Amino acid sequence: MDVLRIAPSIRVQNDQISMMGKSSISVMVDDRQILLSGEDMINFLKNIKLDNIKSIEVITNPPAKYETEGNSGIVDIKLKKARANSWSNTTRTSYIQAIYPSFSIGNSFSYQKNKLSLLFDISVSPYTRIYTNESKYDYPKEYWKNNIYNKARIHPISGLLNLGYDVSKNLRIGFQYLGNMSHLKKDKIGTANAYNRGVGDLKKLIQTTADYYNHSFNGNLLKKLDTLGKQLSLDVDYFAYKADRNNLLNAEYKSYLWAVSKKEYIENLNLQKINNFSTKIDFDMLYEWARLSFGGNPARWYLTANSYEEGNPFLQPSFTSDVEVSHTYSKTREGFGQLILHDLQNDIQSFIGKNYYDYDNFVCSEYIQHAVFAWWRASAEASIYYSETKAYSEYLNPQYYEYN
């Protein structure tokens, strides 16, 4: 996470990642998208150690092959590769003392010999995080005072494995694993006090326990078709995610003016599982007049053309103009949504999952770069995107019944 703070155009604030001028951002590791978001993504990034990162690429106008939607940007984290004909092992520890202590311990092993390369890393880094807030409001007839105290204890375990083998000079196969497991225990204590007229106190205690895991497996193949730069790559990916949450709410309200006291207890259990399998094949074809990149997977297609021409370096100053035109189109049929039925009389909520929308997305982007002089390179980029959601199911209107 810390290395993203110094990346250009990237903003990290309150454990939220954003890109300047973009409505959303995707995170990739070695050109492979991470299918997480929110706090799950933050925990995943915190467990990628700085020692294993080679570089970070910020793509503000992604080509079509990356399958972004709308006005999105990409952060691609490149992991280090093992040095040729060598091995190394590093054990690391750290300790930080704040209001609550935190520490981490991990081990990294890399190996490269002849046709085989290996990188393995595992780490454990438990920590405690707190958040406090006090707010006061002065009204003509009332004075409010609110206090919030949140304490979260997180125990994550993460692992990384990169394995590569050169079958021949023109064929390389590889395997990558990225995984993270964590246990979360969070206490949220909130109090709200109102003084003078309508005196009342509201106290809430929310206790959350959760267990998470995510495992990402990738098998890849890279085949060189000739010595000029033509190649194809094949990726097979499997992603597994599970979140098991238990939320307990204890609330107590007191009104000293009316001598009323009310207590409320709510338990919310949530279990989420995601399993995703995908394949993708890419071709990179280099010719004297153009460089073509194209490929596809069972759900999407893309086409990217990079055209250029070069002057004669012996007869005139050499120059290069790169023109890239990217366009994507994606369509979601029968998108999954959720409708809620609420019985106020018995305080029961019923959740109904229903397919109720179609989603269309179109993106067109253009990037032009030109070396005017040896010391001056000009570039311009533009993008147009359009998205539309069509609902074909009527939303349920809430209806309440009261019997006396």
Image (spheres, grey):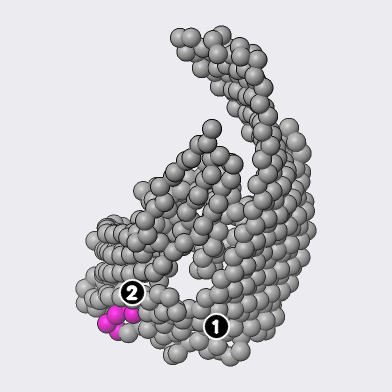
Q: Amino acid at mark 1?
A: Leu
- N-terminal of the two: label 2 or label 1? 1
Residue 304 - label? 2
Q: Magenta residues: mostly which secondary structure?
A: strand
Residue 129 point in image, percent of width and height: 68, 39
Residue 109 - label? none
Find residue 198 and report its image quarter: top right
Instruction: Depth check: give the residue in front, 251 or 243.
Output: 251
Residue linked to disc 1: 221
In magenta, the rendered stretch is 288-293
Residue 388 point in image, percent of width and height: 31, 59
Label 2 and label 1: CA atoms lie apart by 21 Å
Camera sees residue 60: no
Residue 206 point in image, percent of width and height: 67, 37
Relative to 74, residue 192 above or below: above
Instruction: Depth check: give the residue in front, 3 or 326.
Output: 326
Residue 367 magenta: no
Q: What kind of element bears circle 2?
A: strand
Circle 1 packing at 10 Å, graded few (<14), some (14-19), many (20+), is some
Residue 73 point in image, percent of width and height: 41, 57
